[in-house]
Image (spheres, grey):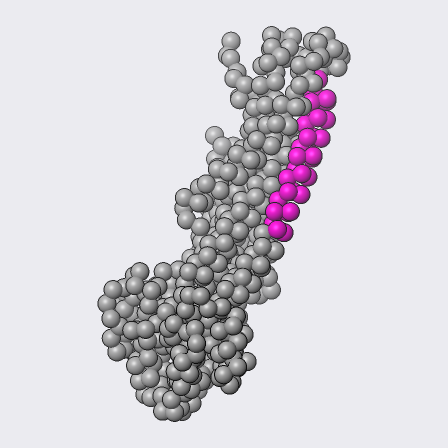
Amino acid sequence: MKKYGTIFLAAKNIKRKNIRSFGLIAIVAIFAFVLFDASILITNIQRGISTTSQRMGADLMVVPLDYETDFEDILLRSEPSTFYMNEDVEQQVAEIDGVEATSSQLFLQSLNADCCTVPVQLIGFDMERDLTVVPWLEENYDGQLEDGEIVIGSQIIAEVGDILVFYDQEFEVAAKLAETGMGLDSSVYMTFDTAHKMCMNSSQESLHRIAQDGENISCVMVEVQPGYSLDETARDIEDRIEGIDVIITKNFIGSLAEQLDMIAKFLYVLIFFIWIIAVIVIGIIFHITIHERRGEFGLYRALGYSKVKLKRLILAEGLLISIAGSAIGIFIGAMLILSFQNLIIASLSLPYISATTGEIIFFILASILLSVLSVVVICVLASRKIGRLETFLLMREQL
Amino acid sequence: MNKNRISALLLIIVGILQILVPVYLLPVCSKTLELVSGNTVPMKCHWYANGVCLMGVILLLQAVIKLWDKCNGAGKSCDLFLIITGMATILLGTDFVIGVCSGTRMACHMGTRPAVNILGAITIVISVADLALHWKKAK
């Protein structure tokens, strides 16, 4: 006689009761989906904020008055913008007590660009003194940027050696920067000299002013001396220089961390509620099913199945259902979160860096483990009832 | 309800979604490109959206034929054509056929193409599963 293993019988039982099994698999799948996607989302935003905080480099950022929002849009949402102020501002900032070092950057919005179809942010920086771009650039590029050379963010679709055209002029890509999860990933970087030459040679009259009138910086990055208060130094700068706004990097990062905190709290509550609902529903379904199947279990007992084997059968059913449910949930979750990553980044307006393969594998295993454990515990509790009933009592249900 | 009908109904839903995604659900933008002459032309994504809608209509018709195919005679060939339709839908989003705009933060790049690719993949999975069932039945 052919012997059937517990797993085989469990699979047969699941297939026989396909609507009930489909319902249970769907509940586990929803839980695994939410658990996996929420974990990936929180981790990716956390890493994005941490990288942003490392990348900022400067303690304070000085921008023209009323351009604070534009500046944040460039940093977070890759919404390009052009604004500038007089280059004397950098010198004035450098003379204020507590200021250790300064460097400036120039922000220009390109016209529609071949590389990206839409306008991109062009950023001019000082190769010798820059506090933010250069440390970041040094990770991928150890040379000096020459005239006509550019460095591109990770979201720009081009490779090193490619030629990109901005304002009817050709630029060669010298390096591609590592991902930061910020809007800066969609920006193009060039030295001040290259930016000035581009403005001068451009057919756009408005750009000539930038190169000719000394209105050639958009923001000043400031490093504050140790021992000086960031708030007081920022206030000092705002009091002494007219027509500027000062952004304190720590506060900027802090506000991002607060937003993450809110999102994380919402997601944790969501995971908890879905887990509770899943456990209650699966518990009730298993309880009712086991009650209904008492006659069937009596037959198994009459055929020589021990109580332990019967419990194993129920456990195997739970195990198969939870593995199938969590695999389906995680597969759908991974497909959605990886496919719509850029849409999520744009909707959240928070720095976001994709998880590594190792992290994804960890979250897959953790989500499967938690989903399977929850169902297995329910099965163990539900199957205890079977162990307490005698065979004749179980058999009576079949009659 | 027999399995052939279930898969046909699922494919009808996928076909309807494929028509709605590029126009209403996750639409491509309506921006235009300015030529040197001063004229404007629609961007790549406009043609991509048209292509996806057309493939959606073809998918919908195939699924309706599959639903009413009571004698099951066209089963296997219908599934094969559905697999090809799914593949063609995914290929529309590559530069080899039409592609989408190159800006990674553009609506077509962020939303439309991933959604259409997922629908294409679902079409392929359902059709392959259905084809396998037809083969099993024939044996």
| Residue A179 located left or right of residue A76 | left
Using the image as rendered, state which of residue B54 and residue A61 is in the foreground. A61
| Residue at 46% in and 73% down | A61
Position of residue A204 relative to residue A161, above or below, is below
Please state the extent of the stretch shown in magenta in the rendering.
A265-294
Position of residue A128 relative to residue B118, above or below, is below
Residue A279 highlighted magenta (yes or no): yes
| Residue at 64% in and 47% down | A270
Residue A366 highlighted magenta (yes or no): no
Residue A88 location, x and y as percent? 40, 86
Q: Quadrant of residue A205?
A: bottom left
Residue B139 shows up from this direction:
yes
Position of residue A323 relative to residue B115, above or below, is above
Position of residue B22 relative to residue B132, above or below, is below
Residue B94 shows up from this direction:
no
Using the image as rendered, state which of residue A42 and residue A365 is in the foreground. A42
| Residue at 56% in and 63% down | A255
Using the image as rendered, state which of residue B132 and residue B100 is in the foreground. B100
Predominant SS of the magenta segment: helix
Q: How many marks?
A: 0
Residue A148 location, x and y as percent? 27, 77
Q: Quadrant of residue A118?
A: bottom left
Quadrant for the N terminus of chain B in the image: top right
Residue B6 location, x and y as percent? 61, 42
